[in-house]
Structure formats: C-alpha cells, structure tokens
Image (cartoon, helix red, strand yellow):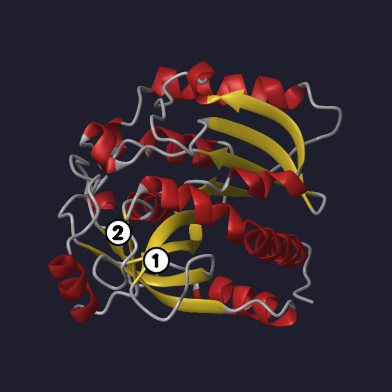
Amino acid sequence: MANDDMSNDTQQSSVDFINNIIGLLPKPFHAKAAMILGSGLGTVTEQAELLAEISYQDIPGFPETGVAGHSGSMFLALVNGHPMIILNGRIHFYEQADAGAMAPVIATLKALGIETLIITNAAGSLLNAAPGSVMMIKDYINFTGQSPLFGVADNSRFVSMSKAYDSQYRYRLRQIAEKNDIHLAQGVYAWMAGPQFETPAEIRAIRMMGADAVGMSTVPETILARYHGMKVAALSIITNYGAGMDDVRLSHEQTLEYAPKAAAKVQILISGFMDFLYAEKHGSNN
C-alpha cells in the first residue's frame, strides 16, 4: 500500500544506498526522469550509456521480480547525454496479489528527485496495430477493481486521474514519431489482473468498453506516480492480438519474441523525448 510502501527508515536506507553509488560516479548525476521497461524490452538500454547497474535485491525494501524478461535491475544511465534512471523489471499484481507491489520503487524514485516517469509494457492489440508496433497510451480502464492506494489514510489518496498521461508529453512523442517516420498509434489501455490471458469473450467485452490494447501492468505505476506528483508518459509495445482476433496461440514466449522487434522504435522515441525534457528544463522547447 502506498502509505506503507516501506518504513521511513527503510526508504531512507534505499535512497542513501542509491545515492552512495551515484556519489561514486565520475561525474555528477542528477536524473529528473525514470523509465520502467516492460517484458522483453531490456534491449532498449543498448543505446544508453550505462554508468552503474544495481540489483533490486541489493536495494533495501525493493521487491524481487519473478517474470522472464524482467531482470530486476536499476540502471543509472545517460540517454543522449541526459541522466536517466532505467528500471529493467516490475512486479505485477498477479505475482503477489498486491496492486501496491511497486510502491517502494515509485516512492524511492520520488525521493531521488524524479519528476517524470516513462512507463513501457508489452500488450495485446485490440485495434489495427500489428505485433511489433508501438501504441502511446492516452488513458486507461482498470478492470481489476484494485488500487495501489488501498489503505492510504488521508485525503492524498483521492488522486485525480483525469490527466493520467500528460497531454504535452503525448504531443511531443507524436512529433518525434512523425519526424522519424514511426507509426505511433494512440489508444486506451485496459488493465487485467492475469496471469492467464483473456478469453475471446473478455476481449470482445473490453473492445466494446473502448479499450485499444490490453495488458497486466502499468496502471498501478501510473496511479502511484500521479499520487507522488510525477508526470507520466506510457508506451505499449504490441506483441500479439487479443484472444480470438487471430489463430496464433497466445504465450509469454510470443511476448518475448515480438517486444525486441519494437525496441529500436522505443529507443528513438525515448531519445527524442529526453532531448525535449532537458531542453524544456533549460528554457527551450526547440
């Protein structure tokens, strides 16, 4: 739960642990943006300059990942020369039956000074986006009935989600995609609990409710980031069609096969987005 993501002492220990490693870097490292990588997207880090890798297991209070394609590592990196914290791995609701499993991670990012969270995931397409393509998330539907804010005891739990995904960020990502001739779909993401894939009947219902892609993550992290006052951008990497939409048997291996095919597109989008973020912080949006 967000108000109990870790004790104050443990959270301070996690921040101190990471800051100690930052202090050992040859140059100052003041990241204002962080990115969570979805299943099979570890190759996105190949174009970044990795300064340090920290296992989740070594960070006080951090959860342990247990899904193939999620290494459970924090990277201190430079993307186009801009500092960024990259999280290769997340905890899903279905692993621990806890929507707040990523709360310690997001709270630590906030304490480290992160202002922008970029979230990526692997998702099933419910529209005309083929496997290997990218969809920018403009809104979400939570079909699980779960929230990482269950148990928060004060009025901070009543977070407005009317602008969950920052409109200016979406505009800039569209510009970057057009400049680089990348087809970037835009749509609504449906969060399902998993770990089983959806039935064809569920996919039909989800499509009727207005969703364009379906997956098992991202929404808890979005809620937590907004709870902490971060701006959010999110990208779905399309790895398959929803159940009943084609004849391919759904599997996690399919996710791991198609996600890397979109990695090059994600690298270009994130690289340009980081240029925009740091130009904005220095008073220019050019």
Give the side of residue 96 with respect to residue 202, left or right: right
Residue type, label 1: Ala
For residue 21, which numbered disc appears in the image?
none
Q: Nearer the viewer, residue 41 or 189?
A: 41
Say which residue label 2 marks.
159
Q: Nearer the viewer, residue 143 or 29?
A: 143
Residue projecting furthest to the right: 26
Residue 272 horizontal/vertical position (percent): 73, 66
Give the side of residue 122 with respect to residue 170, left or right: left
Say which residue label 1 marks.
164
Q: Nearer the viewer, residue 177 or 150?
A: 177
**Quadrant of the rendered image containing residue 73:** top right
Q: Residue at x 41, y 22 (%)?
A: 61
Q: Residue at x 66, y 60 (%)?
A: 270
Q: Is residue 87 above or below residue 66?
A: below
Q: The N terminus appears in which quarter of the rendering?
A: top left
Residue type, label 2: Val
Is residue 76 something that shows in the picture? Answer: yes
Q: Residues within 10 Å of mark 1 (few under 14, many from 20)?
A: many
Residue 184 horizontal/vertical position (percent): 56, 76
Q: Residue at x 13, y 69 (%)?
A: 201
Of helix, strand and loop, which one carries label 2?
Answer: loop
Mark 2 touches mark 1? (CB < 8 Å): no
If you read the primary sequence from the N terminus, does the residue marked by circle 2 or circle 1 appear first?
Answer: 2
Q: Depth-wise, is mark 2 or mark 1 nearer the camera?
A: 1
Residue 241 horizontal/vertical position (percent): 36, 68
Q: The C terminus appears in which quarter of the rendering?
A: bottom right
Instruction: Measure the C-alpha gap from mark 2 to mark 1.
Output: 10 Å
Q: Residue at x 54, y 74 (%)?
A: 170
Q: Residues within 10 Å of mark 2 (few under 14, many from 20)?
A: some
Is residue 118 something that shows in the picture? Answer: no
